[in-house]
Amino acid sequence: MTFNNQVDMYNSINYDFQHIFNTFDVNNRLLCTFVALEGLDELINEVSKTYDIMYNKVFVLHVQNTGEYVITYNIDQGNVNVIPQNTILVHRKKESNTLYTINALNELIKSLNRGVLDPSYRINWVEYRNSILLTQHNELKTLNTKIHKIIELG
């Protein structure tokens, strides 16, 4: 599998992927790549060969409400040449195991704060435990996750 030839199977789902054009902006960032079960091992192998994975760990999550899988990994800044399709840049709240995009965070705040986007608004992250917050057609989408496996590299 090469990243350039991957089929974009998530176009039918229409998550609002924010394509990463300037790969230098992803230094020390958490990437989340969506994949079908059949392509999971091949993707993990390709990612581990292509990048220096920080912390030598790849987390595989099962998205319970859709049957999808995602792998999450931090990549080292020195070898970012290409980003796999179906990959988004996410942030993580460790306390609740919540992954989220900035767009999803903004939509969440607006939904909880009567339509007002207030960066100081406090979110009760426990309510979003073990989930990924994304946008789909500019609306908040919550994907419930469960750890499928943790892969120790190296």
Image (tube, grey):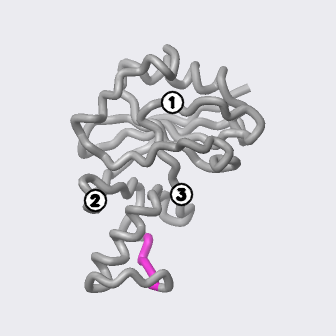
What amino acid type is highlighted by mark number 2?
A: Asn
Q: Is residue 84 above or below residue 133?
A: above
Label 1 and label 2: CA atoms lie apart by: 23 Å
Instruction: Determine the image quadrant of residue 14.
Output: top left
* Percent of width and height locating residue 68: 32, 35
Check residue 84 in the rendering and tell me which mark sits there, or answer none. Answer: 1
What amino acid type is highlighted by mark number 3?
A: His
- Front residue (pair 86, 144): 86
Q: Is mark 1 on a helix, strand or loop?
A: loop
Q: How many labels does the image show?
A: 3
Q: In this view, does 123 lie above or below 145?
A: below
Label 3 and label 1: CA atoms lie apart by: 18 Å
First in sequence: mark 1 vs mark 2: 1
Q: Name the residue under label 2.
A: 138
Q: Is mark 2 on a helix, strand or loop?
A: loop
Q: Nearer the viewer, mark 3 or mark 1?
A: 1
Task: Name the dominant secondary structure of the magenta segment.
Answer: loop
What amino acid type is highlighted by mark number 1?
A: Pro
First in sequence: mark 3 vs mark 2: 3
Bounds of the magenta span? 121-125
Check residue 126 in the rendering and tell me which mark sits there, or answer none. Answer: none
* Percent of width and height locating residue 128: 38, 65
Q: Mark 3 points at which residue?
A: 91
Residue that extends furthest to the right in the rendered view of this protein: 78
